[in-house]
Image: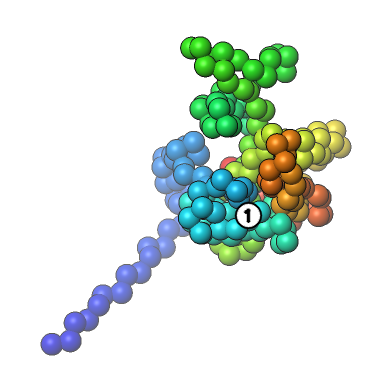
Amino acid sequence: MAIVKKEQTQVAIPDAEFDQLMDDFKIDSSDILIPKILLMQPSSVFVNDGDATLGDFRNSVTKEKLGSINESFSFVPFHFTKSWDIVGDGGKFVRKEEFKPGDENLPWELDSEGVRMKRIKRLDFFGFPLKKLEQGDQLPMILSFRSTSYREGTKILTQFKLNISKRKLPWCNVWSIKGEKLKNEDNQTCCVTKVDILGETPQDVLEHCMSW
């Protein structure tokens, strides 16, 4: 006997009724798993496991490659947070702390229960790689700037401020994101993130940013 599969059809709901239904179906954005865009370093797990190459930008969840040292990608940042990374010996991450008004003058080094640690400023930008939006992926991603890359992150904040002063939306620019290889103070190879403005954000992307 042949098995006949019953096809499922989506129930059509009028727009007004759908909007009302969704008003009661609240999902806080803080409860959504938002992938990070990771710049691969010599010590990165993906590199050590053979899943990525030094200088790649990878999705922290799927490991998908978004760009690299040789291949930039387009990104529209629409929101940011500022924090401290507390690190121990060898730069090992210990915890994240909120960056509060007046924290600019805090010492870089601190003592926690007899253990010497360091504070490192961090900028996290929530935004959309345009390529992923074109592929139908509606979730934002997080691109971080810290340590030697922090100054590049301030370029985005500076442009946010300029846009606001012109009564424009802060996220009205598309940015080119690319990696650059260099030597750190210990003469070890590392990669930093470099940014440049590409142009204006498309109208549909502007509106999508506002929905978040």
- The amino acid type, in three-letter code, at marker 1 is Leu
Q: Is residue 2 left or right of residue 81?
A: left
Q: Is residue 23 left or right of residue 192?
A: left
Relative to the observer, which residue lies in front, 203 or 53? Answer: 53
Relative to the observer, which residue lies in front, 133 or 43? Answer: 43
Q: Position of residue 1 (x, y in %)?
A: 13, 87
Question: Colour scheme in the image?
Answer: rainbow
Q: Position of residue 115 (x, y in %)?
A: 52, 16
Q: Residue furthest front?
A: 187
> Is residue 201 visible in the rendered structure shown here?
no
Q: Position of residue 135 (x, y in %)?
A: 58, 64
Q: Residue at x 71, y 57 (%)?
A: 69
Q: Residue at x 56, y 62 (%)?
A: 136
Q: Residue furthest bottom?
A: 1
- Does residue 86 lie above or below 140 as drawn? above
Pointer 1: residues within 10 angstroms few (<14), some, or many (20+)? many
- Does residue 127 lie above or below 94 as drawn? below
Q: Residue at x 80, y 39 (%)?
A: 155
| Residue ID for mark 1 | 54
- Does residue 210 lie above or below 62 as drawn? above
Relative to the observer, which residue lies in front, 9 or 18? Answer: 9
> Is residue 128 visible in the rendered structure shown here?
yes
